[in-house]
Image (cartoon, rainbow, N blue to C red):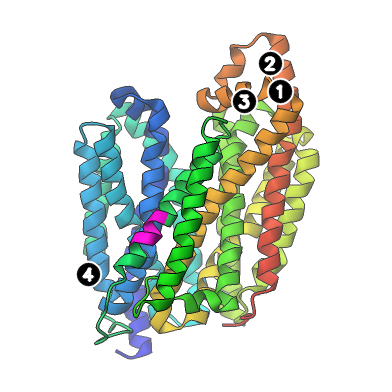
């Protein structure tokens, strides 16, 4: 198939690729609002976080595996396998009799979801010229943004009206529709056609241990519960040890799970660093911003949701702008290099002025800073794929997924540490009150005496300045690495 014919065939199939991305992305957000309903039926609200953590660990581990499988066996064929795994996980969640079974099903589902994200991103790089990829990666960013907005709303509504199991039932016909649309994907001969693959089982085992220990440790650490900190530290040591052994094994493996040559390329590893910093800032902010809106600014959940919607719209606009400009000029990392410093400056200004700023200017600034963030999303994929070349396309796409997941977990832990540290300095009683506030929602403040509620709000105003400051620092880190990516034009 000629390049033009391949491009035309892919564009006809692109709605299916977008739906695959949406399916995998919405599964990460739709379950969060159902956790209280799951806890009410199965018990153990303190253990329901494993439903989210299990999915994240499995998705992160799936990325390099399916990136490599796609390079060897062809991405179209492997996409059907990933959809089958995802559907099996959904079905397991529907029939799960208890919490351990549900967590196990979420591991299967996360494995399929992580595979789908990696394969869909690589499909774009496989079928389109480098300059055009940014435009379609921007559309993928739009699918992410829609999933972020749609998922919590749909999850809350379904769990309230039809029960939480209906969430996973709804995902099954979506997976079937993805399989139908995936049949329209053009066949592309694998980049490593005819190469005998010797799968790196030892590398996989060490990678799973490293990722699981790191992500679970970060999840425990971000709670800043003194009783959990020794466990988090032990998991951190385990992750470091497994990572050190993994590097040794991968250097000697004939067909390594993680091609270390990718990480030696400064255009690739610095691009991954941009992704980790920016996604860490974004997820860390979104984790705490609704609490800030409802406690410091006194907004109801509806208006605070509109503020987050403004951020989603800004992020999508930034992604589309960067994708269009990359297609027109060929410059990719130029746009995050320009806009990420602006975003960092806005977050730093909000650390000072946000508590008393009128809502309309605040919403505009949040949309503007999300625009700055959005310019990096398509450009990270385009740059990493261009630097890697076709034979390592799947591995490069998997590396982006890995950097995003690790960045999200690390960024959330760092932002939480900054906020809790600031709370600790305000007084010994503030941190336990804030922990209850996060667990029980803004209604917790209504249970306090008026004087105690006023004191807590005043303490939160000062402590939450660290939320904006820490996010500004992470964004500045992303800007630093964006400026230092050698590959500027694709």
Please name the residue that numbered disc 4 is placed on: 183
Is residue 198 within the magenta segment? no
Marks 1/3: CA–CA distance: 10 Å
* Mark closer to the chain start, 4 or 1: 4
Q: CA–CA distance between discs 4 and 2?
A: 58 Å
**Which mark is in front, 3 or 2?**
3
Q: Say what secondary structure mark 2 lies in.
A: helix
Between disc 4 and disc 3, whose residue precedes? 4
* Residue at 51% in and 61% down: 403
User: Do the residues under discs 2 and 1 have CB atoms within 8 angstroms?
Assistant: yes
C-beta proximity under 8 Å, tags 4 and 1 = no
| Residues at marks 4 and 3, CA–CA distance in whole angstroms | 50 Å
Between marks 4 and 1 in the image, the one whose residue lies nearer the viewer: 1
Reading the chain from its start, which is encountered first: label 4 or label 2?
Answer: 4
- Whether residue 142 is visible here, answered yes or no, is no
- Circle nearer the N terminus (1, 3): 3
Give 138 or 268, whichever is nearer the viewer. Answer: 268
Answer with mark 3 or mark 2, whichever residue precedes in sequence. 3
Q: Name the mark nearer the viewer: 1 or 3.
A: 3
Q: Which residues are magenta?
A: 205-209
Residue at x 60% of width, y 37% of height: 288
Residue 457 is marked as 1
Please, what secondary structure does the residue beneath circle 4 have? Answer: loop
Q: Is residue 453 left or right of residue 271?
A: right
User: What numbered label is drawn on residue 453?
Assistant: 2
Q: CA distance from mark 4 to mark 1?
A: 55 Å
Residue 434 numbered tag? 3
- Crowding at label 1, few (<14), some or many (≥20) Cα neighbours within 10 Å? some
Which one is in front, 79 or 49?
A: 49
Point out residue 244 in the picture as x, y percentages from the top left corner: 49, 63
């Amino acid at each position: 198939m000629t390049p033009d014919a391949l491009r035309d065939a892919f564009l006809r199939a692109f709605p299916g690729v977008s739906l695959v991305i949406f399916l995998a992305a919405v599964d990460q957000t739709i379950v969060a609002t159902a956790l209280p309903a799951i806890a009410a039926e199965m018990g153990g609200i303190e253990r329901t976080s494993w439903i989210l953590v299990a999915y994240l660990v499995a998705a992160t581990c799936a990325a390099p595996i399916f990136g490599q499988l796609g390079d060897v066996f062809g991405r179209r064929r492997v996409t059907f396998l990933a959809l089958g795994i995802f559907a099996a996980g959904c079905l397991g969640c529907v029939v799960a009799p208890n919490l351990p079974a549900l967590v196990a099903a979420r591991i299967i589902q996360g494995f399929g979801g992580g595979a789908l994200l990696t394969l869909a991103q690589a499909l774009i790089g496989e079928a389109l010229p480098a300059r055009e990829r940014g435009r379609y990666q921007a559309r993928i960013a739009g699918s992410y943004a829609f999933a972020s907005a749609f998922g919590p709303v749909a999850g809350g509504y379904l769990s309230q009206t039809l029960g939480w199991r209906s969430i996973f039932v709804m995902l099954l016909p979506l997976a079937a529709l993805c399989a139908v649309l995936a049949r329209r994907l053009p066949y592309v001969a694998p980049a490593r056609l005819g190469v005998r693959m010797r799968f790196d089982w030892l590398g996989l085992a060490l990678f799973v241990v490293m990722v699981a220990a790191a992500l679970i440790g970060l999840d425990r650490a971000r709670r800043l519960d003194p009783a959990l900190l020794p466990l988090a530290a032990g998991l951190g040591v385990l992750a470091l040890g497994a990572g050190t052994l993994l590097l040794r094994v991968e250097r000697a493996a004939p067909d390594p799970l993680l091609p270390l040559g990718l990480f030696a390329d400064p255009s690739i590893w610095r691009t991954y660093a941009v992704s980790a910093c920016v996604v860490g800032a974004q997820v860390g902010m979104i984790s705490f911003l609704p609490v800030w809106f409802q406690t410091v600014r006194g907004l109801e959940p509806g208006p605070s949701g509109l503020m987050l919607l403004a951020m989603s719209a800004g992020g999508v606009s930034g992604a589309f702008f960067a994708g269009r400009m990359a297609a027109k000029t060929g410059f990719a990392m130029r746009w995050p290099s320009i806009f990420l410093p602006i975003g960092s400056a806005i977050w730093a200004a909000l650390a000072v002025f946000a508590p008393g700023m009128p809502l309309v200017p605040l919403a505009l600034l949040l949309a503007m800073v999300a625009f700055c963030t959005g310019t990096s999303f398509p450009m990270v994929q385009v740059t990493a794929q261009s630097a890697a070349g076709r034979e390592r396309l799947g591995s490069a796409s998997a590396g982006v997924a890995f950097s995003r997941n690790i960045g999200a977990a690390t960024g959330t832990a760092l932002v939480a540490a900054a906020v809790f540290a600031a709370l600790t300095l305000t007084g010994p009683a503030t941190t336990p009150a804030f922990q209850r506030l996060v667990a029980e929602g803004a209604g917790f403040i209504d249970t306090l005496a008026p004087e105690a509620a006023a004191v807590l709000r005043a303490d939160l105003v000062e402590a939450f300045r660290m939320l904006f400051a820490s996010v500004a620092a992470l964004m500045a880190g992303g800007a630093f690495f964006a400026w230092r990516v050698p590959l500027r034009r694709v």
